[in-house]
Amino acid sequence: MNIQENYSLKDYNTFGVDVSAKYFGEVTSLEELTNILRNPSVQNSQLLFLGGGSNILFTQDFDGVVLQLNLKGISEKIENDNEVVVTSKAGENWHEFVKFCLDRNYGGLENLSLIPGNVGTSPMQNIGAYGTEIKDTFLSCKVLNLETLDVEEFDHQKCQFGYRESIFKREGKGKYVILEVSFKLTRKEHSMKTEYGAIKSELEKLGIISPTIQDISTAVINIRQSKLPDPKVIGNAGSFFKNPSISQQQFLQLQKNYPEMPNFPNGNLVKVPAGWLIEQCGWKGKQIGNVGSHPLQALVIVNVTGEATGKEIYDFSTMIIASVKEKFGIELEREVNII
């Protein structure tokens, strides 16, 4: 494998932030990966694995080794008349993988269409959209233990999924790298989730009464394209903040002053859309220097000029957090990984 020095990462993060890695290499096989990890100089360096670079913000140059995981391949195993296990290597593009499944009429991932990034990072975030999360169809993933260099298998329980959370973002952070992910999907009896308001409206607009999983995917793609900017056109990482969950007591208190506040039950808590909170604080469409909040979706921070530094983007997000905290007493949490 060719290791390059002082390598620009501008094309490897969807914010388009121009930082460099001290060392950079592209990994295409498990053997290649384990060989480089056995290298003493790599073992003594700070290490970062990159997938599609869609959920990361570089605030400075990376003084270590960056490895892009470009492991490719998709396989299928028919379980029974109605179930199939589809396994994808970590380097496959997420949306292309969803399309692969839809082309074969495999149901379960259609609501997650057009989410940027690669398959390998999907369990880390427990990615979700429009009433569906990875954990709903996740079966298992194979990981490389970075300490022992042994391949291990993590099942649903071991991954400890939460809202945009998993073991890989908590106690397992920096200890494992995901090699492949397996999903259990349906072949015939699809459990379609169309109750999400925006999907209902879009299906009605399309004149579809009895939707297929392909119709739901089309609706989701239309919604995302109408609200969310394309990272290839303007640098962004999708939703920058998590939707906060607050206590019933805090919500009822806020509701007195903001009766129109959208809310969703989340166990004993109440989930409030971060985008709505940000918009109420006047950030939607606001620009400071090279950075702005997207005019159609306040939850998305964009590199407006293409020249923003990671620090500018981070500072912009800090101002939003402070503003929401001051107005609502709610502290937003960044969903994007800060490097």
Image: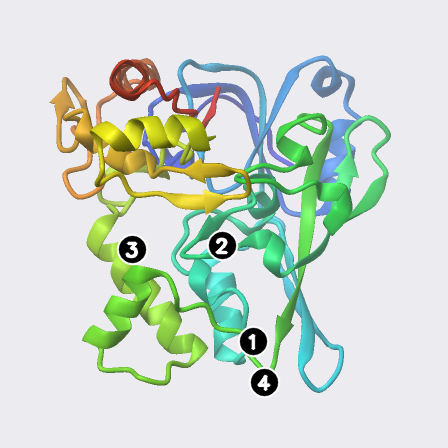
Is residue 301 visible in the rendered structure shown here?
no
Residue type marked 3:
Arg
Query: Spatial distance from mark 2 to mark 3, Cα to Cα?
Result: 17 Å
Decide: is 254 above or below 69. Answer: above
Query: Spatial distance from mark 4 to mark 2, Cα to Cα?
Result: 25 Å
Q: Position of residue 1 (x, y in %)?
A: 65, 37
Instruction: Verify CB contact (< 8 Å) between mark 3 and mark 1.
Output: no
SS at badge 1: loop
Is residue 253 visible in the rendered structure shown here?
yes
Query: Spatial distance from mark 3 to mark 1, Cα to Cα?
Result: 22 Å
The residue at 73%/27% (across/down) is 175
Q: Position of residue 331 (x, y in %)?
A: 39, 20
SS at badge 4: loop
Instruction: Verify CB contact (< 8 Å) between mark 4 and mark 1.
Output: no
Residue under pointer 3: 224
Instruction: Verify CB contact (< 8 Å) between mark 4 and mark 2.
Output: no
Of pointers 2 and 1, the one earlier in the residue sequence: 2
25 horizontally vs 240: left or right: right
Which of the two discs, 4 and 1, sits closer to the camera? 4
Give me the disc on residue 188.
Answer: 4
Q: Position of residue 108 (x, y in %)?
A: 54, 68
Instruction: Verify CB contact (< 8 Å) between mark 2 and mark 3.
Output: no
Decide: is 337 above or below 234. Answer: above
Query: Spatial distance from mark 4 to mark 3, Cα to Cα?
Result: 27 Å
Of pointers 3 and 1, the one earlier in the residue sequence: 1
80 horizontally vs 26: left or right: right
Of pointers 2 and 3, the one earlier in the residue sequence: 2
Instruction: Verify CB contact (< 8 Å) between mark 2 and mark 1.
Output: no
Residue under pointer 2: 93
Residue type marked 2:
Asn
- The image quarter containing residue 217 is bottom left
Of pointers 4 and 2, the one earlier in the residue sequence: 2
